[in-house]
Image (cartoon, rainbow, N blue to C red):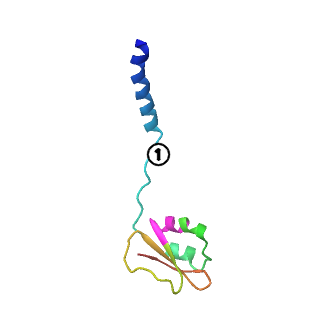
Amino acid sequence: MRTLVMGLPLLVAAGLVQGCTTMEPPAAPRGPCVVDGRVKMRFAGVKFRARMRPEIEQATNAAMSRVLRPGDAATMDFRADRLNILLDDGGLIDGLRCG
């Protein structure tokens, strides 16, 4: 019984250390958004699909994005880490703007 009591703290400590080593580091924060000529050339006039959103966010370093169609209401607050994906009536990407 004595060896079980003495060995228990070692097993608990080993389990705690092992649990901590398997954790992934937190994701690096993103932002501010940057739209350069290369990104504009890559996506201008392309039919927007929802699956493209992460790729566009990654290319512009944006933490978040919103899709705006003609006539959509949008807040006027400026967020340096947000990308606005502007679409035309046909669903083509008409522009990319930070804010």
- Which residues are drawn in magenta? 55-65
Task: Classify residue 14 by image quadrant.
Answer: top left
**Residue pictured at 59% horizontal, 70% vertical:** 50
Q: Is residue 69 magenta?
A: no
Q: Position of residue 48 (x, y in %)?
A: 60, 75
Q: Is residue 59 magenta?
A: yes
| Residue type pointed to by label 1 | Glu
Q: Position of residue 51 (x, y in %)?
A: 60, 67
Q: In which quadrant will I find the N terminus?
A: top left
The local secondary structure at tag 1 comes to loop
**Residue pictured at 56% horizontal, 73% vertical:** 42
Q: In which quadrant will I find the C terminus?
A: bottom left
For this orientation, the residue located farthest to the top is 2
**Residue pictured at 37% horizontal, 76% vertical:** 78
Nearer to the camera, 10 or 37: 10
Q: Is residue 16 above or below residue 51?
A: above
Nearer to the camera, 40 or 57: 57
Residue named by callout 1: 24
Any part of residue 7 in sight: yes
Any part of residue 35 in sight: no
**Residue pictured at 62% horizontal, 77% vertical:** 47
Q: Is residue 97 above or below residue 1?
A: below
Q: Is residue 21 above or below residue 82?
A: above
Q: Is residue 60 above or below residue 24?
A: below
- For this view, does 43 lie left or right of residue 3? right
Task: Classify residue 77 by image quadrant.
Answer: bottom left
For this orientation, the residue located farthest to the front is 1
Question: How many C-alpha atoms fall within 10 Å of the one at disc 1: few (<14), some, or many (≥20)?
Answer: few
Q: Position of residue 69 (x, y in %)?
A: 54, 82
